[in-house]
Image (cartoon, rainbow, N blue to C red):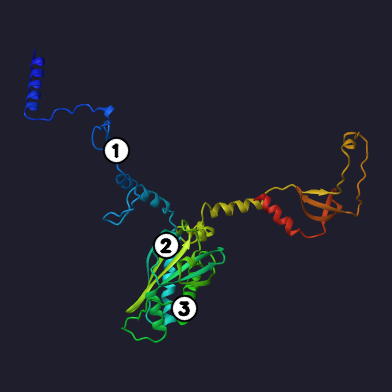
């Protein structure tokens, strides 16, 4: 009886709520008349318009408050530039900064400070589109790596170097004349500075691996400085050069394809790290190899005879050898010929006296088979 009383009270409250002005349930739509149930609704699902779809997929490529692109497109783009870290590369460029500080001081006869801003991964096409013009792009070749790199010198550093090398006053800002190509003098002075930087880069890589960087050409149009496909990944190193109240930036770009031949070396945590090698075990293995028992054969003669004759051999048959008592006997280790000698007798045993030194090629072949 208590349950029935509670149900009656709940029904009475619901009826009172509807009586106070609550909206009655909407009538079922007339599907024959083609009237939708509501704005953008099919049944109980809402239809997204084109703007909402583009916003969800990130096709508008709009930036949020933090400057980051949102949506599925941003996720795809971030995944494509997520590459492995190369710890040794940071050591190489830190060494490059120290070398450049000294060499540029000697080059300019001025107080030069070089600092490393950051090292990042970027697509090559995105980098070309982000270069602030005017600038000089130096294409250089890494001979041992058989590929190219890019060195960008911005306009502030160009005018600062020209001003310093041609005796400009200190404390005065370098005069910039926009809208004109760089003169021959400016290009020559920048080329000399680039050659100094490339020589320091060669010295920075020297403890890791010998790499010779050779300047190929200077360009002012990024389209003519294409050394890789736009979607290829690259390492971008930004360097800041300050000469008291003057200075600018140098950006060094190395595609991953250029660094691929030395990738294992760049993965090292410290200089000289050996991957999967144990020096103690190697020493023990070398010691044991010297005491390894090895079968050596003395071959008097070799002949090729028909198989039918071999199958018809009987006890007492004689095979004539093309050798005499004075013929040289070949000494072999398996199928590898070592040396030659003469057959004799010593203490009731047949012996071979070597008549020639061990063949170096045979020696290397035996060592290779043992290891």
Farthest residue in the front direction? 33
Q: Earlier in the sequence, mark 1 or mark 3?
A: 1
Q: Position of residue 178 (x, y in %)?
A: 37, 76
Say few, some or many: other residues with alpha carbon within 10 Å of mark 1 (under 14 / 14 to 19 / 20 or more): few
Q: Which residue, given by chain and number where applicable, does mark 1 sit on?
A: 47
Quarter of the image where the N terminus is located = top left
Q: Position of residue 200 (x, y in %)?
A: 48, 72
Q: Position of residue 38 (x, y in %)?
A: 23, 34
Q: Earlier in the sequence, mark 3 or mark 2?
A: 2
Q: Is residue 109 visible?
A: no
Where on the picture, by quarter, is residue 328? bottom right
| Side of 5 relative to 220 (left or right) | left
**Vertically, is 198 above or below 362?**
below
Residue positioned 51% across, 54% down in the render: 275
Q: Which residue, given by chain and number where applicable, does mark 2 sit on?
A: 127
Mark 2 vs mark 1: in front: 1
Q: Nearer the viewer, residue 240 or 310?
A: 240
Q: Mark 2: which secondary structure? A: helix
């Amino acid at each position: 009886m208590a349950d029935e009383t509670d149900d009656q009270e709940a029904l009475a409250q619901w009826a009172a709520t509807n009586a106070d002005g609550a909206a009655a349930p909407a009538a079922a739509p007339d599907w024959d008349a083609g009237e939708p149930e509501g704005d953008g609704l099919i049944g109980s699902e809402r239809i997204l318009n084109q703007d909402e779809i583009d916003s969800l997929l990130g096709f508008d490529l709009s930036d949020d408050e933090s400057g980051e692109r949102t949506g599925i497109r941003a996720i795809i783009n971030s995944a494509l530039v997520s590459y492995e870290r190369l710890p040794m590369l940071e050591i190489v460029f830190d060494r490059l900064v120290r070398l450049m500080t000294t060499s540029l001081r000697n080059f300019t006869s001025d107080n030069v400070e070089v600092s490393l801003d950051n090292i990042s991964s970027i697509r090559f096409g995105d980098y070309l589109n982000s270069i602030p013009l005017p600038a000089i792009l130096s294409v250089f070749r890494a001979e041992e790596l058989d590929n190219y790199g890019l060195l960008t010198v911005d306009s502030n550093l160009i005018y600062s170097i020209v001003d310093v090398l041609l005796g400009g006053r200190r404390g005065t800002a370098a005069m910039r004349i926009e809208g004109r190509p760089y003169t021959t003098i400016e290009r020559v002075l920048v080329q000399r500075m680039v050659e100094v930087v490339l020589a320091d880069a060669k010295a920075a890589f020297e403890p890791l691996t010998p790499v010779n960087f050779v300047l190929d050409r200077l360009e002012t149009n990024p389209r003519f400085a294409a050394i890789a496909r736009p979607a290829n990944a690259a390492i971008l190193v930004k360097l800041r050069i300050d000469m008291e109240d003057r200075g600018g930036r140098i950006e060094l770009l190395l595609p991953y394809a250029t660094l691929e031949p030395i990738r294992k070396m760049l993965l090292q945590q410290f200089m000289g790290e050996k991957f999967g090698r144990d020096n103690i075990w190697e020493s023990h293995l070398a010691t044991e190899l010297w005491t390894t028992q090895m079968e050596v054969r003395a071959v008097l003669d070799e002949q090729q005879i028909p198989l039918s004759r071999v199958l018809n051999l009987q006890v007492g048959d004689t095979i004539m050898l093309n050798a005499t008592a004075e013929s040289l006997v070949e000494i072999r280790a398996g199928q590898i010929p070592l040396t030659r000698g003469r057959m004799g007798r010593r203490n009731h045993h047949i012996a071979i006296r070597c008549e020639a030194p061990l063949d170096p090629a045979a020696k290397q072949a035996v060592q290779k088979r043992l290891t």
